[in-house]
Image (cartoon, rainbow, N blue to C red):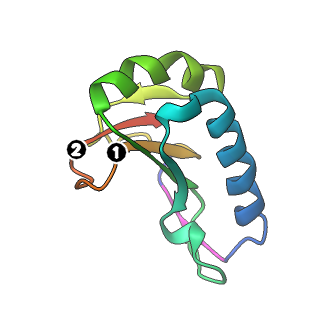
Amino acid sequence: MRPVVVAYRADWPDRAATLTASLRDRLGPRAERIEHIGSTSIPGMAAKDILDMQVSVAGLAEAASAFDEPLAGLGFERVPYDDYSDIKDPVVDVVIAAEEWAMATGWRA
C-alpha cells in the first residue's frame, strides 16, 4: 500500500490509545515507553493514514525475540527497519530508550 495524505481523522487518538493498551498488555515491562508518534499524533494535521507507534526498550536483542510472539498475536510481522516497500497500518517501531532511531527493529501489521 502506498501511503496517501488524508484530512485529519478524529479517531486517530482513540485508535492509538487502544493500540497502546494492547501493546502494554502484550509486551509487559520490557516496553519501557509506548508512544503514538508521527503525523497522526498531531491534532488537526493532515497525515498519512498510518498510525506510528514507538516502543522504547533497554535492549533490541532481548526485545526482538521476546516481542515476536506477542506482536504476531496482534497481527504484526517483523520486517527490516528500512523496508518501506509495503507499509501497512499500523506500524510499531521498537527503539532503544534514549538512543537514535537508526537502532531499531520494526513490525508491520
Name the residue located 67 percent from the left edge and 55 percent from the top edge: 16
Q: Which residue lies furthest to the front in this view?
A: 29
Q: Residues within 10 Å of mark 1 (few under 14, many from 20)?
A: many
Q: What residue type is labelled 2?
A: Met
On the image, the x and y values in percent for residue 70 come to 58, 21
Does residue 59 sit above or below 98 in this rendering?
above
Q: Give the range drawn in magenta.
A: 3-7
Q: Is mark 2 on a helix, strand or loop?
A: loop
Q: Which of marks 1 and 2 is nearer the N terminus?
A: 1
Residue at 53% from the left image edge and 64% from the top image edge: 4
Q: Mark 2 points at which residue?
A: 103
Please name the predominant secondary structure of the magenta segment in the image: loop
The picture places residue 94, in percent across and down from the top left corner, at 40, 41
Instruction: State the image quarter where residue 57 is shown.
Output: top left
Badge 2 crowding class, 10 Å Cα cut-off, few under 14, some 14 to 19, many 20 or more, is: few
51 or 57: nearer the viewer:
57
Report whether 64 appears left or right of 42: left
Q: Distance between the residues labelled 1 and 2?
A: 6 Å
Residue 65 in view, yes or no:
yes
Residue 95 shows which numbered tag? Answer: 1
Tell me the kind of residue under disc 1: Val
Residue at the (71%, 44%) spot, across then down = 21
Location of residue 3 in the rendering, given as x and y in whole percent from the top left corner = 49, 57
